[in-house]
Every structure is written in C-alpha cells, then in structure tokens.
Image (cartoon, rainbow, N blue to C red):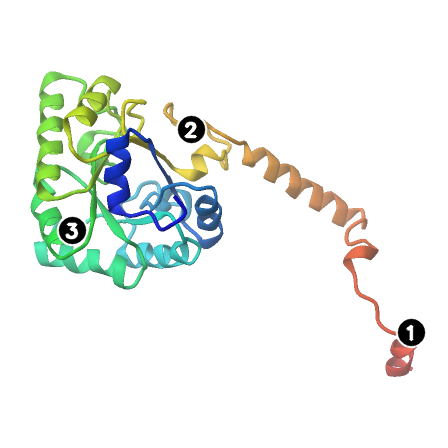
Amino acid sequence: MAEKVTVADFRRMKGEGTPITMLTAYDCNLARLVDEAGIDSILVGDSLGNVVLGYQSTIPVTMDDMIHHVKAVSRGTRRALLVGDMPFLSYHLSRERAIANAGRFLQEGGAQAVKLEGGREVAEAIRGIVEAGIPVVAHLGLTPQSVNQLGGYLVQGRDEKAARKLIDDALAVEEAGAFALVLECVPEALATYLSRELSIPTIGIGAGAGCDGQVLVSTDMLGLYGNQPPRFVRQFANLNAQIREALAGYREEVRARTFPAAEHTFAMPEGILEKVTG
C-alpha cells in the first residue's frame, strides 16, 4: 500500500485480518522515519506532555501545544494516516467547542483524524465531530486524561462491573461514529472479545495480540529513556545507551582536541591571512 492510508483502509484491514500498525511521533524528523518504515498511522499523542514537554501527566497539554506538534509531524508524513490527540477539556465543555477544536487539527495541523478519550459520556461530542466530516478514533480503558479519577495508571475492566461498562462504552462510541478504538491496559480476553464484536478496528496498547492493531509510544519502544518502560512495551532498540555513548565520545574528543580533525575543517588560499593581518 504505497498511497495515503485512509479510514477506509482501516476498515479493509480489519476485514482482511491484517494487523494495523500505529506509533506516536512529535516532530518532523521522527515522523519521517516512522512514515518511511511503512507504519500505517501516526498518532501525535498528548503523551508529548510527558516525553517532550517534561510534564508529570498529560493534563497541562493545551490545544496550541498539540497543533504546534501536529503541524511539525504533518511536514514529515506522506503515507501514514495522521491522527491528532485532543487534549484535556478540548472536547468536554460543549459540542460546538469540541467540533471547533477538532477542526483545528485538520485545518491548521494537517491531520486526517482526531482521537478522544472516554466512552458514553463523550459520545455526543464524537457524533458532532463525525457529522462535521472529521474522522474520530475513540480511546477506552486506561485514559490518561482521567488518571486522577481512575486512581492511577491501572489496568481497567478486570471486574464484572468495570468490564460491563467498558463493553457498553465501546458500543456507544462505535454507534456515535468512531472509525477505530484504542484499548489501553485492558485484559487480553476482554480486548479480544471487543475486537470480535465491534465492526470497527481495535488498536491495542497493553491489551494483547487479539486486537486488530497495535500502538506504542515511539520513545518507549526505541528505548530513548533510561527508566523502566511499562510492562506492555517491548523495546525494539536501546537508543538511550547509544546516545549516551555518542555524547560521551564527543566530550572526550573535544577535550583531547582530536575533534575537529582536518577532514572537518576548511582551508583558505595560502597567503590570504598574511595579507589581511600583516
């Protein structure tokens, strides 16, 4: 699939049983690498609050923060479906404000879709955004914007009451018009059940292999930080160690005056310096 990935491709891939791949990106350079690797979708997550802006949660992230980074990512994206994450309180206050904020991701940012956290309580916002012609990815399970209400970063849907609510919420966001559903930190059996029951594709993160696709935070799976990643993350590289080694090497060579060497410098015609300084 060399052409631009679309919402229709998500539906087709679910029907064919082809797993959908999604990764986050927050700048043009990383977006270009993700896109050229053939990843189906790039999510500019509000996780940029943690991994780029240095916040302790996603709560402080603003619409202007998100639009700034979506614009950067769009400049590096040619093939992947670009999804912008709607931040805290950008879609909760009114249907009209939700539509206007979602529209900014497409009109200003160059995204093709937006993502919202929540279930039945945000179904009306999803419906309004979809009716305005903006594709929506829903997000259930561990929803980081609601971490204070959830009591921490915990697996969701483990007991009967929570599992029933998650199923009801999934049906509600599907009915409201979402074209895909992210399931985060949900028991594998429940996520697999939802993937079978829903007509829209599920994208798992800590939800097992039974989902229709997978998403990870790129900085986690690339090992850009020295901290222990969440259990559901596989680190496909350890760039933290490589970067640290490169930085230490630079420091040592500068101090030893072995960098820059002759091949890193520029010459001027012989005699010119004497003429201008003599």
Residue 277: image quadrant is bottom right
Q: Residues within 10 Å of mark 3 (few under 14, many from 20)?
A: many
Q: Residue at x 28, y 22 (%)?
A: 210
Q: Residues within 10 Å of mark 1 (few under 14, many from 20)?
A: few
Q: Earlier in the sequence, mark 2 or mark 1?
A: 2
At mark 3, the secondary structure is loop
Residue 229: image quadrant is top left
C-alpha distance separating marks 3 and 1: 67 Å
Q: Residue at x 53, y 31 (%)?
A: 237
At mark 1, the secondary structure is loop
The picture places residue 60, in percent across and down from the top left corner, at 28, 49
C-alpha distance separating marks 2 and 3: 30 Å
Q: Residue at x 83, y 67 (%)?
A: 267
The residue singled out by tag 1 in the image is: 270
Closer to the camera: disc 2 or disc 1?
1
Question: Which of the pair 254/101 is nearer the observer?
Answer: 101
Q: Residues within 10 Å of mark 2 (few under 14, many from 20)?
A: some
The residue singled out by tag 2 in the image is: 229
Q: Amino acid at mark 3?
A: Tyr
Q: Residue at x 13, y 32 (%)?
A: 170
Vertical arrangement, residue 82 with respect to residue 229, above or below: below
Instruction: Indicate which disc residue 181 carries.
Output: none
Which quadrant would the C terminus be assigned to in this image?
bottom right
Instruction: Indicate which disc residue 91 carries.
Output: 3
Question: Which of the pair 231/78 is nearer the observer?
Answer: 78
Q: Earlier in the sequence, mark 2 or mark 3?
A: 3
Q: Amino acid at mark 2?
A: Pro
The picture places residue 74, in percent across and down from the top left corner, at 38, 56
At mark 2, the secondary structure is loop
